[in-house]
Amino acid sequence: MRYIEPHAHMVSRVTDDYRDMLAAGCAAVSEPAFWAGFDRGTPQGFHDYFCQLTDYEPKRAAKFGLPHFCWLCINPKESENVSLAEEVLAMIPRFLDRPNVLGIGEIGLNKNSRNELRVLEMHVDLAARQDQMILVHTPHLEDKLKGTNLILDVLKSDRRFNPGRVIIDHVEEHTVKPVLDAGFWAGMTLYPESKCTAARSVDIIECYGAERLWMNSACDWGNSVPLAVPYAALEMRRRGHSLDEIDRLIYRNPVQFLGQNPRFKLGEEQPA
Ligand SMILES: [Zn+2]
């Protein structure tokens, strides 16, 4: 098996996780910027985090032979403070030229507040001006559908975007269709408790097909499983999906999306 982990917060994982991912067939990891479990209080805190994502973490992954890529933003959970967000956004262009940066993310909404929406629009504008791809986080709360629709409205009303260069992550049964219908990519996040389980994600694939869909573990400092993607592949296999279908979903699809940025390069050619 070969796969891409397109959404993992490796800064909060131990090196044993890198080793296990490699052993399971991981060919590259992509790491969106996210909330650290506490609110960073200053732009300097974000500066250091962006240095970690663009300098230290790719070196740590390289020790295991794993290409590491990242996305930059201020996370929706920290978007209530608009003036802090403005300072962080002003800093991001300085990092966009770093060789492992793929775009702006994970932006989006958490509680669907007015300030979060404003900061989302600021990020979307920055991405458009800088011609960057976007990775979007949707709320985990009961208002996921409302938040997803608000995000889709913001993205669809901006004519500067090709929806094929935007992925909306953490989709579930009730949000995947509007995302795909609008031409965006959709990510299914495999969590042991919330979001999608492996079985639910395979249900979604069986209902909607595998086009413009990927799976990720979104492993972080919380209750999450770094090998969730290969485990979901085992569930697909158990339910009779072919090896080619599995390879498309967990390897070729993320390569197709991420590869729209020429910086996304794999190491050695992966065997099929
Ligand atoms: Zn995340």
Image (cartoon, rainbow, N blue to C red):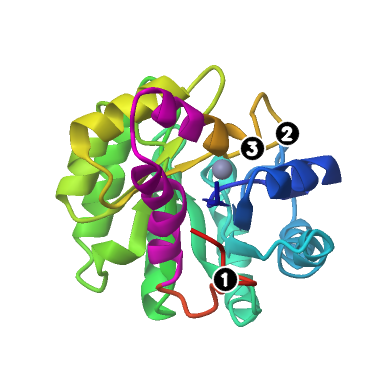
Q: Amino acid at mark 1?
A: Glu
Q: In the image, residue 38 lies at what x, y percent?
A: 73, 36
Can residue 23 be found in the magenta stretch? no
171 sits left or right of 264 in the view = left
Of 127 and 114, the residue lying toward us:
127
Q: Position of residue 262 (x, y in %)?
A: 48, 80
Label pair 3/2, CB-CB below 8 angstroms: no
Query: Which mark, by number, is residue 269?
Result: 1
Badge number at residue 221: 2
Alpha carbon of mark 3 to alpha carbon of mark 1: how far?
Answer: 26 Å
| Residue drawn where x is 76% and y is 49% of the image | 11
| Front residue of 64 and 53 | 64
Nearer to us of marks 3 and 1 is 1
For the residue pair 179 and 155, the one nearer the viewer reads as 179
Q: Is residue 256 above or below residue 81?
A: below
Q: Residue at x 72, y 45 (%)?
A: 23
Specify the quadrant of the image occupied by residue 90.
Answer: bottom right
Find the magenta span and give its range. 232-259
Residue that numbered label 3 is attached to: 219
